[in-house]
Image: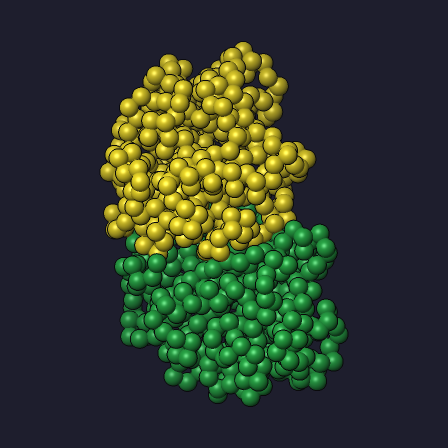
Chain colours: A yellow, B green
């Protein structure tokens, strides 16, 4: 693969809704808000959109709605090709990959990628059960939920590399600090190490403030073959790579790494002809704090077993490099599962255009997104570059 | 759009499982069977597959499984990019479109498209409810099910064009005759006009034998940039087009046509540079018998209001032209929703290679598939050509 594709992929506009418990808002409403904002920014009209890729996981299992492409095409009032892309919590990243593929194919000139999830209208136990749709049969049968699976991953990393509960708490503190600079975050306020460490245990060693929340929200990105009205501020997607792994943890040799993320990152760096050390800013899939520590190592930002100390030293905090999860990440910005992979692109796009506000990473030229499905059965990596 | 894409899209292999009430078989098992048959036919190895596109509608709402790309990648034992594509009963057609897009993009050399649905393990009322996930909110709230929606479509067509219950019954009789030549069909036996007309009413004017059944099954297609080992018998996909329309019937001006199908067909003919009259063989979405009559008109095979008489005269039966639904269609071959759009491609591919057995259309060179989601909110048209 790599390099054979002819068309460049430009991001012309991108937006997210506020993330949070949005009980008064419908999925239609959320998608529409961010789509129209992204379109306005792009300088394109609705009639320029030639296809829609919708990232969503739970519309069927929770919402009883299984025709999501046409659903949003109708809501927007355009009868273009539209489809839902599903890959658990990586649905948004996969929808971006499908949109990227569509633009590189030359079949469509401008496409819309929309990630959306409505999760807080259901009972927590219903949501926890539906989310286990991302796992293996054996894990569901054993009564496992995602916190328990990531707790096992955390224990493995602690045993092998001496990672501590305090190391994990540092991730939550950093991401809440970043979120405090993001008005669209679900939890736009700082927290302390002590608060994390004293929060109630969800699945030992993971505590409440190690876990990303249940969130409603949507994000939209306008992709094009051409640079559009804002050609001097152009942002390109220069790599889009996906890899998969076993659904269940029991089939894996090593729980301290996500092989899918390592594989997808390798492909992405190759496609973009860049190295991990070239990345200025990244949004990674911190569904649990341990996941961000592992992501830092899987992406090659730090050597295996060294990410925790790098995070402690503030290397991934605003002011360091690479700065990670300026949006607040899944932990503090929120995690509407199908929207997350698209929101990550929105944040990196804004960083590279220098319009990320108080959380701006100065001089950011190269950014990366890392979106994971389940406990790592799917990983999607994108690399974005400003001109 | 059209013509700008660089790569040709070759079908190297294609297969379906038996369709029916397959209580002893799992989705894994079904997908694996047809994938390995398609791969064997293609001359490729499993390791040549670079991505997997899974067409499926109900895995989340009925099966509680929402990570279907990785699910089947794991089952096949390859850690390649994989994702589920959903668009109600057009999920299979949309997965084909995504596979087509992937090949034309140049990102992947060989991809696998798999359509799969397991529907008979659930109570009929659960399935009927889940299928309404394809419809509009207002239709669900009104208690409508798909037979009732297509009954309204049938009434409109009857009033406007004088179509009769007997005309609709003719479709069922033809498709059961074709299915009698297809050992993989759910109902491989002929039926009579009288049997259809005397079958119990489901939603007047539609009777039991006007309706497609609830079915388990899977279908797989291997797509490639290159013609492979069987280059003299090569089949190309020369057009892949999608269009959408309102989810609900209430918002449409005319119930005697599916605008999405008309739009997608127009695009497909344009892309392929062929006309309706050039098509030798077609698989169309006869979820109800009225749907095949309307498809004949929407695709331009016969003038509006003239399809019923053409069907009555045997023009779409083996021996006529264009021959329609040689597999038996959704009506008699069965309708495992996410698999249907892929199965249609398998059948046309076999017709164009001249390996369709007893149901072979002699000298077929150009074929078409017509896959519809819900009551027409999504339509996907493919045109296939033999060398």
Identify whether A306 is placed above or below B250. Answer: above
Quadrant for residue B36, please give it.
Answer: bottom left
> At which x and y percent is residue A200?
62, 19
Depth check, front residue: A137 or B4: B4
> At which x and y percent is residue A270?
27, 40
In the image, A309: left or right of A36?
A: left
Depth check, front residue: A273 or B89: B89
Quadrant for residue B199, please give it.
Answer: bottom right
| Residue at x 41%, y 79% (from the top left corner) | B277
> At which x and y percent is residue B33?
49, 62
| Residue at x 47%, y 75% (from the top left corner) | B300
Quadrant for residue A241, please give it.
Answer: top left
* Location of the C terminus of chain A (image quadrant): top left
Depth check, front residue: B239 or A298: B239
Is residue B354 visible to us here? no
Identify whether A288 is placed above or below A173. Answer: below
| Residue at x 56%, y 56% (from the top left corner) | B246
| Residue at x 55%, y 81% (from the top left corner) | B306
Is residue B6 visible to us here? yes
Identify whether B54 is placed above or below A136. Answer: below
> At which x and y percent is residue A188?
52, 21
In the image, B27: left or right of B361?
A: right
């Amino acid at each position: 693969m790599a390099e054979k594709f002819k068309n460049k992929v430009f991001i012309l506009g991108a937006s997210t809704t506020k993330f949070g418990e949005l009980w008064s808002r419908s999925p239609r409403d959320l998608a529409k808000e961010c789509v129209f904002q992204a379109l306005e920014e792009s300088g394109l009209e609705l009639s320029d959109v030639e296809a829609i890729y919708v990232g969503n996981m739970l519309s069927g299992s929770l919402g009883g709605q299984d025709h999501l492409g046409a659903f949003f095409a109708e809501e927007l009032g355009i009868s273009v090709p539209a489809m839902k892309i599903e890959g658990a919590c990586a649905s948004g990243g996969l929808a971006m990959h499908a949109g990227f593929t569509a633009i590189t194919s030359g079949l469509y000139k401008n496409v819309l990628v929309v990630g959306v999830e409505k999760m807080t209208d259901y009972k927590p136990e219903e949501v926890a059960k539906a989310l286990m749709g991302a796992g293996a049969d054996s894990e569901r049968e054993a009564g496992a939920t995602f916190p328990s699976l990531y707790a096992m991953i955390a224990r493995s990393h602690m045993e092998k590399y001496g990672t501590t509960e305090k190391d994990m708490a540092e991730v939550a503190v950093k991401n809440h600090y970043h979120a405090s600079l993001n008005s669209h975050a679900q939890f736009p306020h700082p927290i302390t190490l002590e608060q994390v460490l004293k929060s109630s245990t969800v699945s030992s060693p993971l505590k409440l403030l190690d876990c990303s929340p249940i969130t409603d929200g949507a994000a939209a990105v306008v992709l094009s073959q051409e640079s559009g009205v804002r050609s001097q501020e152009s942002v390109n997607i220069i790599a889009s790579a996906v890899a998969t792994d076993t659904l269940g943890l029991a089939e894996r040799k090593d729980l301290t790494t996500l092989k899918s993320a390592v594989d997808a990152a390798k492909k992405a760096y190759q496609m973009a002809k860049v190295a991990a050390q070239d990345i200025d800013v990244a949004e990674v899939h911190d569904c649990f704090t341990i996941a961000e520590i592992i992501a830092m190592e899987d992406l090659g930002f730090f050597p295996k077993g060294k990410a925790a100390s790098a995070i402690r030293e503030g290397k991934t905090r605003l002011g360091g490099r690479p700065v990670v999860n300026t949006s607040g990440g899944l932990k503090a910005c929120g995690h509407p599962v199908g929207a997350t992979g698209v929101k990550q692109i929105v944040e990196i796009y804004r960083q590279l255009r220098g319009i990320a506000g108080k959380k701006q990473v100065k001089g950011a030229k190269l950014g990366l997104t890392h979106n994971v499905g389940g406990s790592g059965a799917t990983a999607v990596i994108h690399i974005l570059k400003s001109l």
